[in-house]
Image (cartoon, rainbow, N blue to C red):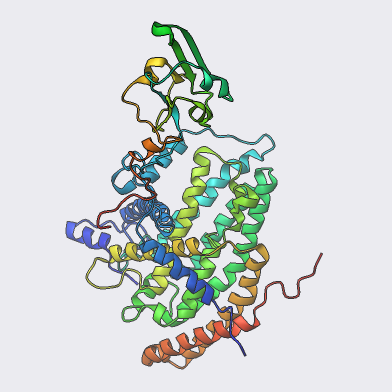
C-alpha cells in the first residue's frame, strides 16, 4: 500500500512560501532607489553634436514617424548651417534609426528616461535643447560612448553584499 | 454564577453600585459594547495590514510602506478613498434588499464579540450557550451575502452568492462537530468556562484533529483562500459584491476581514487558551494569538491555489465530515473514560496519533469526483 496525496505537497508548499518570507526583498523603491539602466539604452530624447553635424538631413529622411524637421541654409565656408532642428518626441518611437543612419556620428540617443511632461508642446525638442552639454549620451550604436557609462544593474545593491 | 470582571471590580473601588441591569450595572453593557466595536474595528485595521504586508513578504515584495510609519495607515487611506466614491445602484436591483444587505453582513461580526472573553469574565455577556450563539450568529451574515447576490440582478453576483451558501452550509457541519469536541472536554458551552478549562493545557494539544477541522472549515466558511471561489475574480468578476461600490463595498470589505478576525478569535479562544498564558496581560495574549492564527491563514492563502467547486464540496463531505464524526466519537469515549481529568497527556498523544492515522487513511479513500454523474 503506497501512501501519497496525504498533504505532503501542501506542507512542502508552505515551507517554500516561508522561505520566501525570510528572503530579502527584491523590490526597488523607485523614487529613492534607482537601478542603473543599460549602457545602450534608447531613452526618449536625442542628443545632438552641433560641431559634427553637416546638416545633410539623413536623420530626417530615415525617421519612420517623420518627426525630425531640419532646416538649413548656406553658412560660412560653403557649409550648411542648421537653422532649426526639431524633434517631436511625442511621436518618437525610440527606434534609433536616425542614430544608426547618421553618417557623421553627430546624433545620439539620450540616456534619460524621466522625461514626462504636462503639455504636449513641451515634448518638442529644439536645436539648443538637443545640443546642451547636460544631456548624457547613450551608447546606442556608439560603442565608444558605451564604454564610458556604468554597467547595468538588475538589483539594488544591499548593504553587506 | 457571578464572575468578577474589570468593570465590576472598578465600580467596587469607586464605591458606586448600580445593579439595575441583569447581572451587571447598566454601564457595563455600554462600556463593553463600545469596547467590542472599537476592538473589532482596530483589529480589522491591524488584520488588513498584516494581510497586505505578509502576502507581499511571501512573494518577496515589500507591501504598503508609504502611508504612515511602516505603512500602518494604509487601511485608513483606503477607507478615505473609498468613502469618496459614488454609490451606484443597478437599475433592476431590488433596492431595499440591496441597501440592507451590507449591514446584515457586518452586524453579526460585531455581535459575536459579545461572548468572547478578553480577560477572566471581561466580556459583554457570559452566555451559558456561548458557542451556540457564535455558530448561530455567524450564519446570519450568509443571509446578507445571499441578499446581496440576489438583489444585484447580476449573474456573477448570484453565482457567487450561491457558491458561498453551498460552502457555508457544507462546512458548518464539520466546524460545529469540531467545536463539540472542545465542549465535551470543557463541559460547558460558555467561552469563559472553556478558556478557564485550558488553565493547564491549551486544547490544541488535546484536540489536534478538532483544531485542524476548525481551521480548514473556518477558512472555508469565511471564504479565505484557498476556498475563496465565491469571489474567484477570474470567473466571477468579484462575486456577490460585483455591483457594490463606495461605502457599501467597504462594509463587505470590513465584514470579510471582520469574519476573519472572528474566526481567528474563536480558534484562539477554543484551542490556544484565549487570554491565558503567563507574563503578559490576558487581552494582549488574546490579540497576539488572533494575529498568529490570522498570519497562518495568510500563509495558507499565499501557498495554496484556489480549489474547484466540486473539490470544495468533496473536501467538506468526504474528508472533513467523516473525520469530524470520528473525532467527536473518540472524544466522547475519552471523556466517558475520565481521561480529561486523569490522563490528559495520554489523551493528547492518542489524539495526535489518531490525527496522523486518519489523514493517512483518508488520503487512500478520498477521491474527488467519485460517483459524479457526467452531464
Q: Residue at x 60, y 54 (%)?
A: B232
Which residue occupies the extreme right position in the image? B375
User: In x, y percent, where is residue B369?
Assistant: 71, 72
The vertical placement of B290 against A50, above or below, is: below
Q: Is residue B32 left or right of residue A88?
A: left
Q: Residue at x 49, y 77 (%)?
A: B210
Residue B191 placement: quadrant: bottom left
Residue B199 placement: quadrant: bottom left
Q: Is residue B317 left or right of residue A125?
A: right
Q: Is residue B351 left or right of residue B169?
A: left
Q: Is residue A140 visible?
A: yes
Quadrant of the rendering where the C terminus of chain A is positioned? bottom left
Which residue occupies the extreme front position in the image? A77
The vertical placement of B26 against A34, above or below, is: below
User: In x, y percent, where is residue B32?
Assistant: 34, 55
User: In x, y percent, where is residue A108?
Assistant: 42, 28
Q: Is residue A46 left or right of residue A97?
A: left
The vertical placement of A90 against B50, above or below, is: above
The one nearer the camera, B196 or A61, is: A61
The vertical placement of B95 against B137, above or below, is: above
Quadrant of the rendering where the N terminus of chain A is positioned? bottom right
Q: How many labels were placed on the picture?
A: 0
User: In x, y percent, where is residue B126?
Assistant: 39, 66
Q: Is residue B265 visible?
A: no
The one nearer the camera, B250 or A11, is: A11
Amino acid at each position: 500500500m503506497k501512501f501519497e496525496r496525504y498533504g505532503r505537497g501542501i506542507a512542502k508548499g508552505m515551507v517554500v512560501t516561508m522561505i520566501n518570507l525570510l528572503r530579502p526583498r527584491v523590490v526597488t523603491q523607485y523614487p529613492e532607489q534607482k537601478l542603473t539602466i543599460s549602457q545602450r539604452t534608447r531613452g526618449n530624447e536625442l542628443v545632438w553634436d552641433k560641431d559634427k553635424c553637416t546638416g545633410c538631413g539623413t536623420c530626417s529622411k530615415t525617421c519612420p514617424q517623420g518627426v525630425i524637421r531640419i532646416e538649413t541654409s548656406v553658412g560660412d565656408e560653403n557649409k550648411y548651417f542648421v537653422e532649426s532642428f526639431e524633434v517631436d518626441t511625442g511621436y518618437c518611437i525610440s527606434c534609433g534609426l536616425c542614430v544608426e543612419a547618421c553618417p557623421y556620428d553627430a546624433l545620439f540617443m539620450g540616456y534619460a528616461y524621466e522625461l514626462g511632461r504636462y503639455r504636449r508642446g513641451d515634448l518638442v525638442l529644439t536645436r539648443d535643447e538637443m545640443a546642451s552639454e547636460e544631456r548624457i549620451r547613450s551608447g546606442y550604436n556608439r560603442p565608444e560612448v558605451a564604454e564610458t557609462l556604468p554597467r547595468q544593474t538588475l538589483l539594488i545593491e544591499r548593504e553587506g553584499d | 454564577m457571578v464572575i468578577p470582571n474589570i468593570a465590576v471590580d472598578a465600580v467596587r473601588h469607586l464605591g458606586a453600585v448600580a445593579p439595575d441591569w441583569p447581572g451587571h450595572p447598566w454601564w457595563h453593557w455600554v462600556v463593553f459594547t463600545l469596547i467590542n466595536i472599537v476592538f473589532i474595528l482596530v483589529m480589522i485595521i491591524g488584520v488588513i495590514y498584516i494581510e497586505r504586508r505578509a502576502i507581499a513578504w511571501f512573494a518577496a515584495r515589500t507591501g504598503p510602506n508609504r502611508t504612515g510609519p511602516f505603512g500602518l495607515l494604509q487601511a485608513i487611506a483606503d477607507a478615505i478613498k473609498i468613502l469618496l466614491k459614488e454609490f451606484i445602484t443597478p437599475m433592476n436591483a431590488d433596492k431595499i434588499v440591496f441597501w440592507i444587505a451590507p449591514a446584515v453582513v457586518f452586524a453579526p461580526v460585531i455581535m459575536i464579540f459579545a461572548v468572547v472573553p478578553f480577560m477572566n469574565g471581561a466580556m459583554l455577556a457570559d452566555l451559558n450557550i456561548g458557542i451556540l450563539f457564535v455558530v448561530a450568529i455567524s450564519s446570519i451574515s450568509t443571509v446578507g451575502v445571499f441578499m446581496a447576490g440576489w438583489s444585484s440582478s447580476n449573474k456573477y453576483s448570484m453565482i457567487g452568492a450561491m457558491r458561498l451558501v453551498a460552502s457555508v452550509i457544507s462546512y458548518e457541519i464539520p466546524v460545529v462537530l469540531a467545536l463539540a469536541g472542545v465542549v465535551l472536554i470543557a463541559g460547558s458551552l460558555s467561552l469563559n468556562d472553556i478558556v478557564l478549562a485550558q488553565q493547564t493545557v491549551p486544547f490544541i494539544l488535546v484536540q489536534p484533529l478538532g483544531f485542524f477541522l476548525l481551521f480548514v472549515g473556518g477558512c472555508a466558511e469565511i471564504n479565505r483562500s484557498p476556498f475563496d471561489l465565491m469571489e474567484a475574480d477570474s470567473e466571477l468578476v468579484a462575486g456577490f459584491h460585483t455591483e457594490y461600490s463606495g461605502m457599501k463595498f467597504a462594509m463587505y470589505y470590513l465584514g470579510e476581514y471582520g469574519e476573519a478576525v472572528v474566526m481567528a478569535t474563536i480558534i484562539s479562544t477554543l484551542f490556544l487558551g484565549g487570554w491565558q498564558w503567563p507574563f503578559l496581560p490576558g487581552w494582549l495574549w488574546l490579540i497576539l494569538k488572533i494575529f498568529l492564527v490570522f498570519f497562518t491563514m495568510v500563509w495558507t492563502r499565499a501557498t495554496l491555489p484556489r480549489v474547484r467547486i466540486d473539490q470544495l464540496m468533496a473536501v467538506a463531505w468526504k474528508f472533513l465530515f467523516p473525520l469530524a464524526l470520528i473525532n467527536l466519537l473518540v472524544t466522547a469515549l475519552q471523556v466517558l473514560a475520565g481521561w480529561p481529568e486523569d490522563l490528559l497527556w495520554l489523551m493528547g498523544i492518542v489524539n495526535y496519533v489518531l490525527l496522523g492515522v486518519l489523514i493517512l487513511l483518508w488520503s487512500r479513500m478520498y477521491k474527488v469526483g467519485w460517483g459524479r454523474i457526467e452531464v
